[in-house]
Image (cartoon, grey):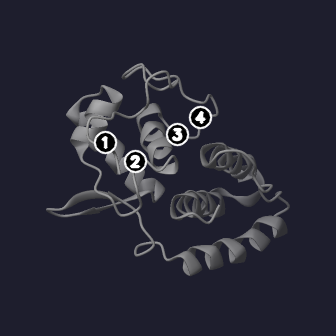
Amino acid sequence: MIAAGRSWPPEGDALSAGAHHESTGEGAFDPIVETVLRAVLAGELQPGERLPERWIVEACGCTQSAAREAIGRLQAHGAVVVLERRGASVISAREAPLGEVDRVWRQLLPLLAASGAQAPPPGEGTAWTRLIKEQAALEAARQTAGDRLTDILKRVSLQRAIVGLA
């Protein structure tokens, strides 16, 4: 949980410069989505925790409208759930059960291999670094594996990272 009085990203972080963040350059996520995902993977936002638009506005130095759009993109990526009258929350094991997410991942990887594409290598480093490498490997497989399989694998990859399987 984000401690009272603490902001994300921490001072000195490459993303602490407001709305004009420097992204990783891999192009996997836009800067606002990247800021939220980095906070989740660093443990600053926990699975199941509410994600208020106000937090995004403060953390990213963006407008309320940009924050709302980012929540939509995070929902499309499978990183948050949005419930009417409750707002957005980071996905948790309730929405993405560990066993089910892992089972889907293990069942889809052979389809990726059957298409002639390479499976993402096991990652090293921080959760963020592993996620970005995995997402880049999956994106590289897009031409061989096709859009649908690649999009599903990228979504499951992100959910695995958030719920702690990757």
Q: Which residue is mark 3?
A: 29
Amino acid on which disc 1 is placed: Glu
Q: Earlier in the sequence, mark 1 or mark 3?
A: 3
- Residue that numbered label 4 is attached to: 27
Location of mark 1 (residue): 69
Residues at circles 1 and 2 in contact by the CB criterion of under 8 Å: yes
Q: Could you tell me which secondary element the residue under label 3 belongs to? A: loop
Q: Nearer the viewer, residue 156 or 2?
A: 2
Res. 66 in view? no
The C terminus: image quadrant: bottom right
Q: Is residue 5 visible?
A: yes
On screen, residue 128 versus residue 118, left or right, reads: left
Task: Indicate the position of residue 18 as horizontal and vertical percent values.
Answer: 37, 21
Q: Which mark is residue 73?
A: 2
Q: Position of residue 52 (x, y in %)?
A: 24, 47
Question: Vertical placement of 64 versus 102: above or below?
Answer: above
